[in-house]
RNA sequence: GCCCGAGUGGCGGAAUUGGUAUACGCGUUCGACUCAAAAUCGAAUGGAGUUAUCCAUGUGGGUUCAAGUCCCACCUCGGGCACCA
């Protein structure tokens, strides 16, 4: 008899899986495929976190479950390596981000292997590998060629600590998602991806996704479609304030290296003759008594009157300086009159034009018609500044405006003024016009430099790589773009790279992609609106270009909850409440215990607190699995062959070498059963367990699947376990505890094919009938299954029961028989 | 403020379609084994009570033969959005 030694078993199987490349996959025609992936990790210096383990194990359970069912299952792995943490660490320690990243990747790989994941290691990708980012740059160029990657000068989120701009999705409560510092608005020329081009489809397709409702709702809200109209308001010519020849006053703004190209929308709405407003209520136009412009409104400088100019510019300056937090916290309306007027096209009234920061520059046209009688915010503003409030009746929606749909979602800002990212494959000619780097020159390699530190110049550290900056395109000398791409760009297509990770000709090889993808299961606990929206956007774009045969990249999304510290708070190194998964393994519990525990901890999509004592409970369960096998093969100690005497264990058992099983015995009542009866009883629980575990995994109820296995083992301890029971146990256990299960199957000489249950074992001859009186449980009777077909007979039997009689002396009003629930309710 | 989740023993959590509330695990108690401890094995374990029985799924109502589950109102916690016209 051997003791359960997880570390020894796990090492054996991990070595075997590694050497045989056990999980290597290739396209197989005729075999149903399945592709699963987790959201690939950012490999931090701290190594794997228990949260990673939960995330990866969910994917692994499904991977192994479907492999055991004979599907061609691909489960790749990758690392999202570009980004600020590596660069900041490099700045702090003086080491290169490349070296630091390489170390972290090696550590993550080693740790993932110690968890026994069924990963196809030939499909390992790394976003900062030039072989990979060559194709990220290729993707960028496709978007650039179609006008979906463009430059625009506008006010952007700027993190003064990280010295870079940020996308809307990376600003959380007015703070930088990385360093937590308050962000500012800064006028800069930046690169954008035109995600708004796909806003409609991104929204309408959400309903067809097998994704959690809460993620779908978040995406819908994020896209925020509003149907309304744009209405033109003419600025009054007789206004003394108006002068079309006046030069604009330049305010704010950061240096930019290329000339500003105003887009069509801006030049139209900042025309000096009219203001276009967006409204969802064009039918309320009769009540529009003033116009409000955002402080950043592009045409503001042109229309402001001389008298008001100073006050307006002062207001604009202070509004821009205000952090977003201040703007959010202070809901008190502020604003100033511009001195200009416009004509309400419906009433022909001359109405004043104001500036106020409750109007947002980035939404609609940055200008609204205020209807204080209808809109709470406008009313508040009107009351504060004593503007007219006119009660109004509604008119035909389409009378004065042109129908227009607007989205809350803005275009995706993708340039970053940082070193450790994918270089944007663009160069500027002497006029400052951007040109694509020819595809044959890709990848644009990230140059090795000495000093990664960003500065306030608004340019990344790449600007210091003087030689690298120069590039010749079509015989013309040009200057390279020094910004790098947002890391989310690198992760917007990695799922497709998995299909052909080493292809030199394509970002993804057409046949491989159409075999493997879209991804069947994608699992993660973050990025509900950013990454998960971006991959959908790129998918639609590349489908339109003919590169992808599907328009949604992810069929099913599993959004797992977090694992918190034992105190219920978020785990963090600084608070000292973090659990290191490698410590749990090395303490002797092993990877199987860790994996199984994290599946057992609770529903996968709910947050859960770590409980060290419960880890021990799962270890005991695996130990009991092991002991069943050991006693099966070690003769006298076997639960199924040891005769129970009611006395202390026989001497022969005491003489056994140290074995945790030596006290396994059978309860007296169960020993009365003959061998034949034993196995028929086991057939029932065996089939029940197969059904439960299979169905639970299909429903992602991993916690109850493990509970079902525990119950099964408890039963086998009582009844004794035959070969069939042990083989079934090992097969069902394998997705959760693959090392132990592999060892068990090897000892049993069995394969790992997923077992099927036979319904015939699940139908018993007699069943327990529940008897309620007035809805309260009063009795239980054994009845024959065939009697359930005969309601009269059942009721007769129930009413004849002694226990029931006590309650029915005063007469029976009504009886209800529910066959499916095997229940009778008697109303007295 | 608006939109989602969730609230069940001492604790984590089960209960899949309205039908036996508390599966499974932790903890606790008792017993076996041991010189002893650990480990292991077995038993018990929602509360009150003399058996009967009564009370328990955040609170208060309602529907129903029957409610953790459905409806109405409210409370608490967590998450998302937050002047989006």
Image: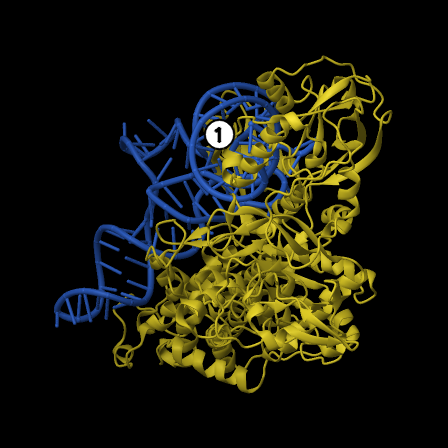
Residue A141 screen position, x and y as percent: 75, 67
Q: Is residue A797 visible?
A: no
Q: In this picture, is A773 found above or below B24?
A: above
Q: Residue furthest top?
A: A391
Within 10 Å of disc 1 (Cα), the crowding (few <14, some 14-19, many 20+) is few
Q: Residue at 53% x, 34% y: name it.
A: A800
- In the figure, residue A307 lies in which quadrant? top right
Which residue does the numbered mark 1 point to in the structure image?
A805
Of A366 and A566, nearer the camera is A366
Residue A393 screen position, x and y as percent: 78, 14
Of A530 and A365, nearer the camera is A365
Q: Residue at 81% x, 30% y: name it.
A: A232
Q: In the image, A440: left or right of A678? A: right
Residue A578 screen position, x and y as percent: 37, 59
Q: Residue furthest bottom?
A: A19
Query: Which chain is rendered yellow in the image?
Result: A
Q: Secondary structure at mark 1?
A: helix
Query: Which chain is rendered blue in the image?
Result: B
Q: Is residue A628 visible?
A: yes
Of A708 and A287, nearer the camera is A287
Q: Residue at 63% x, 26% y: name it.
A: A308
């Amino acid at each position: 008899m051997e003791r359960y030694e997880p570390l020894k078993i796990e090492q054996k199987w991990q070595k075997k899986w590694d050497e045989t490349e056990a999980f290597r996959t290739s396209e197989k025609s005729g075999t149903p495929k399945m592709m699963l992936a987790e959201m690939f990790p950012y490999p931090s210096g701290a190594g794997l976190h228990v949260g990673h383990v939960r995330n990866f194990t969910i994917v692994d359970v499904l991977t192994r479950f479907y492999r055991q069912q004979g599907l061609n299952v691909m489960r790749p792995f990758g690392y999202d390596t570009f980004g600020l943490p590596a660069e900041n660490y490099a700045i702090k320690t003086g080491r290169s981000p490349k070296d630091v990243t390489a170390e972290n990747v090696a550590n993550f790989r080693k740790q993932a292997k110690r968890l026994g994941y069924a990963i196809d290691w030939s499909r390992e990708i790394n976003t900062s590998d030039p072989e990979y980012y060559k194709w990220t740059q290729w993707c960028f160029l496709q978007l650039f060629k179609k006008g979906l990657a463009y430059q625009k000068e506008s006010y952007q989120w700027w993190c003064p600590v990280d010295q870079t701009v940020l996308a809307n999705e990376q600003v959380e409560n007015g703070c930088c998602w990385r360093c937590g510092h308050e962000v500012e608005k800064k006028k800069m020329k930046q690169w954008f991806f035109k995600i708004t081009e796909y806003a409609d489809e991104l929204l309408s397709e959400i309903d067809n996704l097998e994704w959690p409702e809460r993620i779908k709702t978040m995406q819908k809200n994020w896209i925020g479609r509003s149907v309304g109209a744009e209405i033109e308001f003419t600025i009054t010519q007789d206004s003394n304030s108006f002068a079309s020849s006046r030069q604009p006053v330049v305010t704010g703004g950061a240096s930019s290296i290329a000339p500003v190209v105003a887009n069509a929308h801006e030049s139209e709405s900042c025309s000096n003759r009219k203001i276009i407003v967006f409204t969802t209520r064009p039918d309320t136009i009769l009540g529009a008594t003033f116009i409000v412009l955002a402080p950043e409104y592009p045409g503001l400088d042109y229309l402001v009157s001389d008298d008001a100019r100073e006050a307006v510019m002062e207001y604009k300056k202070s509004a821009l300086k205000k952090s977003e937090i201040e703007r959010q916290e202070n809901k008190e309306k502020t604003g100033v009159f511009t001195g200009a007027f416009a004509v309400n096209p419906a009433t022909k009234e001359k109405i004043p034009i104001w500036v106020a920061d409750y109007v947002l520059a980035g939404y609609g046209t940055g200008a609204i018609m205020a209807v204080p009688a209808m809109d709470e915010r406008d009313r508040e503003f009107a009351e504060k500044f004593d503007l007219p409030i006119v009660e109004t009746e509604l008119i035909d929606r389409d009378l004065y405006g042109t129908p227009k749909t607007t989205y809350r979602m803005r275009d995706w800002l993708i340039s970053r003024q940082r070193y450790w990212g994918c270089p944007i494959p663009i160069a500027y000619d002497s006029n400052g016009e951007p040109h694509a780097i020819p595809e044959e020159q890709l990848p644009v390699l990230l140059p090795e430099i000495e000093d990664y530190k960003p500065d306030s110049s608004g340019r990344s550290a790449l600007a210091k790589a003087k030689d690298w900056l120069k590039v010749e395109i079509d015989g013309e000398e040009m200057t390279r773009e020094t910004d790098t791409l947002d890391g989310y760009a690198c992760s917007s297509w990695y799922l497709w790279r998995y299909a052909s990770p080493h292809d030199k000709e394509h970002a993804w090889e057409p046949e491989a992609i159409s075999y493997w993808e879209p991804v069947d299961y994608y699992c993660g606990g973050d990025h509900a609106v950013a990454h998960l929206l971006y991959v959908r956007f790129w998918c639609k774009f590349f489908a339109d270009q003919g590169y992808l045969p599907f328009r949604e990249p992810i069929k099913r999304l599993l959004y797992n909850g977090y694992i918190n510290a034992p105190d219920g708070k978020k785990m963090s190194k600084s608070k000292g409440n973090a659990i290191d998964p490698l410590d749990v393994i090395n303490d002797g519990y092993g990877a199987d215990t860790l994996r199984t525990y994290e599946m057992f901890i609770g529903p996968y999509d709910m947050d859960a607190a770590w409980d060290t004592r419960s880890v021990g409970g799962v270890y005991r369960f695996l130990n009991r699995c092991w002991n069943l096998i050991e006693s099966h093969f070690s003769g006298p100690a076997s639960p199924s062959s040891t005769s129970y005497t009611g006395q202390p264990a026989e001497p022969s058992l005491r003489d056994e070498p140290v074995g945790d099983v030596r006290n396994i015995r059978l309860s007296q009542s169960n020993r009365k059963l003959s061998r034949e009866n034993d196995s028929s009883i086991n057939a029932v629980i065996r089939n029940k367990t197969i059904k439960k575990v299979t169905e639970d995994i299909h429903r992602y109820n991993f916690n109850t699947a493990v509970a079902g296995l525990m119950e099964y083992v408890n039963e086998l301890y009582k009844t004794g376990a035959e070969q069939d029971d042990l083989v079934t146990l090992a097969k069902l256990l394998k997705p959760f505890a693959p090392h132990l299960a592999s060892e068990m199957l090897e000892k049993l000489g069995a394969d790992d094919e997923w077992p099927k249950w036979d319904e015939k074992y699940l139908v018993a001859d007699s069943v327990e009938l529940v008897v309620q009186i007035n809805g309260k449980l009063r009795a239980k009777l054994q009845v024959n299954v065939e009697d359930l077909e005969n309601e009269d007979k059942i009721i007769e039997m129930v009413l004849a029961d002694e226990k029931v009689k006590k309650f029915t002396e005063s007469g029976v009003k009504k009886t209800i028989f529910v066959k499916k629930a095997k229940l009778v309710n008697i109303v007295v």
